[in-house]
Image: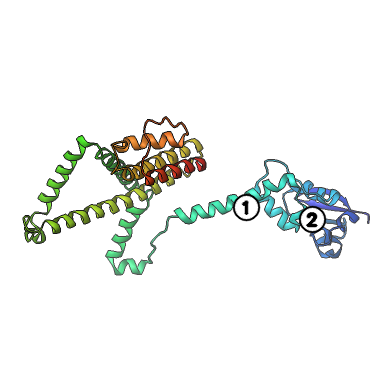
Amino acid sequence: MDRIKINVGGSVFEIFRKELMQYPDTLLGSLSTKVGSSDDVQSMFFFSRNPETFNNILDFYRHGKLHFASGNCGAALHDEIDYWQLPLDAICECCVQEYFRYEKEMEQIKVLKAAFEESDLTYDAQQVLRSRRVYIFNAIWKFLDQPYSSKFAQVFNIVFLLVVIMSALSFILSTNKEFRDVLIDFNTLEFLVKHSELPFFQEIDLNNSKEVLFSTSEAIKELRDIDFACALFFTVEVLILALKHSCKELCLLFLSFLIASIYFAFIVYFAEYKTDDSFETMQIGIWWSIVTMTTVGYGDVFPKSGLGYAVGTVCAFVELLL
């Protein structure tokens, strides 16, 4: 026969045999050897596939180029090409980017899932019955680590987010001289009253052990900074999980820009701490980072030390990435 009939999902297509035999390594090109797959009465091959994209498959045999209609699902195109065993180098240049964009998106999705996938502590019934502590630990872990495990967990994480934001704001305000002394006095008084009954502090002579007291206070300050950093990272993770179902690129760009501004303000504030009073507060540092990353460059505030110059250079390059 010169022509071959192909039934794809109820739609009948016809094509010359010689056109199929040009590509014997493909599924349709090997039809002549697969007699068992055909209906001998009607001389028709049947495939239980979606016929919507089959015209594009046949055009490959007719013209030697594979095109796709715009708007087709990338996963469906991958399945069709794999099923019909078509060579990837046959995809026309105008459709290559659309085809491989699906692979890039899938790789990005895998990376995001691996980074933010909610792990679970699962125990069988015997383990739970054998140890009530395991059950309680699992419930507490879900409550603290998985914001959407229950309504109470959602409320807790919202409150926790507000607390971290307030902590960040209080840290920024503490760089102001009028707030700094008040906050230091309050935190010192609270710490002394809270821990005044501990034997360790009762043994410290404030007149003869100033170095020990100073070292202890510095260590406690570092521990508070580490705890704040861990809380901030958890908050960012919660924020990303809240935004993953929305595609508001503008909001995501704004958040990235705001975080970068705060980080650079924090770095430049301490980089210029021993110089003159150009960066008196972190608010001025935030203003400087925003002006630098938006390439406005008013010049009213600028770093004057070598480390400050390095921070400004990195800040300008980060703006290009954002």
Q: Secondary structure at mark 1?
A: helix
Percent x, y of residue 55 = 79, 46
Count the numbered circles shown: 2
Residue 237's place in the image compared with 129, above or below, is above
Q: Secondary structure at mark 2?
A: strand
Which of the two residues, 181 or 35, is positioned nearer the viewer here? Answer: 181
Which of the two residues, 120 or 281, is positioned nearer the viewer here? Answer: 281
Residue denoted by label 1: 103
Q: In the image, is 276 to the left or to the right of 101?
A: left
Task: Write down the quadrant of residue 196 in the picture.
Answer: bottom left
Q: Give the alpha-carbon distance from disc 2 to disc 1, as whole Å.
A: 30 Å
Of circles 2 and 1, which is in front? 1
Percent x, y of residue 218 = 21, 54
Label for residue 217?
none
Amino acid type assigned to the residue bearing label 1 in the image: Glu
Percent x, y of residue 7 = 80, 52
Percent x, y of residue 190 = 13, 47
Q: In the image, is 266 to the left or to the right of 190?
A: right
Crowding near the residue tagged with mark 2, few <14, some 14–19, many ≥20 C-alpha atoms within 10 Å: some
Colour treatment of the image: rainbow
| Residue found at x 26% / y 37% | 173
Crowding near the residue tagged with mark 1, few <14, some 14–19, many ≥20 C-alpha atoms within 10 Å: some
The tag earlier along the polypeptide, 2 or 1, is 2
Quadrant of image for the N terminus:
bottom right
**Callout 2 touching callout 1 (CB < 8 Å):** no
Task: Write down the quadrant of residue 165 in the picture.
Answer: top left
Residue denoted by label 2: 46
Amino acid type assigned to the residue bearing label 2 in the image: Phe
